[in-house]
Image (cartoon, rainbow, N blue to C red):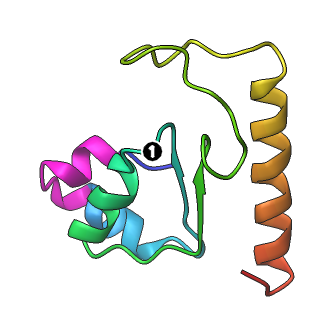
């Protein structure tokens, strides 16, 4: 896991760490795609991407409520992330 905020503020050590990772999966919590945009602006390569709303249909309950979700949503998100990691290990994207 990496600190996306550090990338957004040009902290050199975090950039080098992210560049050195074997695989990078980006996870956005809503359709604003802030994490993906930060990664693109920092020119960090990514191997997988999830928008929890778009790809997993996890509804954000109200604007600016990052912890508002249903009871089953975290489990679905974890399962999807694990499946993506396993797919990357097998050479698929």
User: Could you tell me residue 16's position as x and y percent?
Assistant: 30, 68
The residue depicted at 44 percent of the width and 50 percent of the height is: 2
Indicate whether 6 appears above or below 69.
below
**Tag 1's secondary structure?**
loop
Which residue in the protein does label 1 denote?
Answer: 31
Q: Nearer the viewer, residue 39 or 70?
A: 70
Q: What percent of the width, then of the height, locates residue 10?
A: 13, 56
Question: Within the magenta stretch, is there residue 11?
Answer: yes
32 shown above or below 25: above
Examine the rendered structure and indicate whether residue 71 appears above or below residue 58: above
**Most frequent secondary structure within the magenta stretch:** helix
User: Residue at the location (46% across, 14% down)?
Assistant: 62
Badge 1 crowding class, 10 Å Cα cut-off, few under 14, some 14 to 19, many 20 or more, is few
| Magenta segment boundaries in residue numbering | 4-13
Residue 67, how many percent across, how many down?
A: 54, 14
Question: Where on the picture, by quarter, is residue 48?
Answer: bottom right
Q: Quadrant of the C terminus?
A: bottom right
Q: Position of residue 6 (x, y in %)?
A: 24, 46
């Amino acid at each position: 896991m990496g600190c996306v905020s550090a990338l957004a503020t040009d902290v050199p050590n975090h950039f080098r760490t992210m560049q050195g990772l074997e695989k990078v999966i980006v996870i956005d919590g809503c359709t604003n795609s802030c994490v993906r945009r930060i990664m693109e602006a920092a020119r960090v390569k990514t191997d997988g991407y999830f928008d929890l709303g778009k790809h997993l249909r996890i509804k954000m309950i109200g604007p600016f409520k990052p912890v508002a979700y249903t009871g089953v949503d975290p489990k679905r998100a974890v399962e999807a992330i694990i499946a993506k990691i396993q797919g990357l290990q097998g050479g698929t994207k």
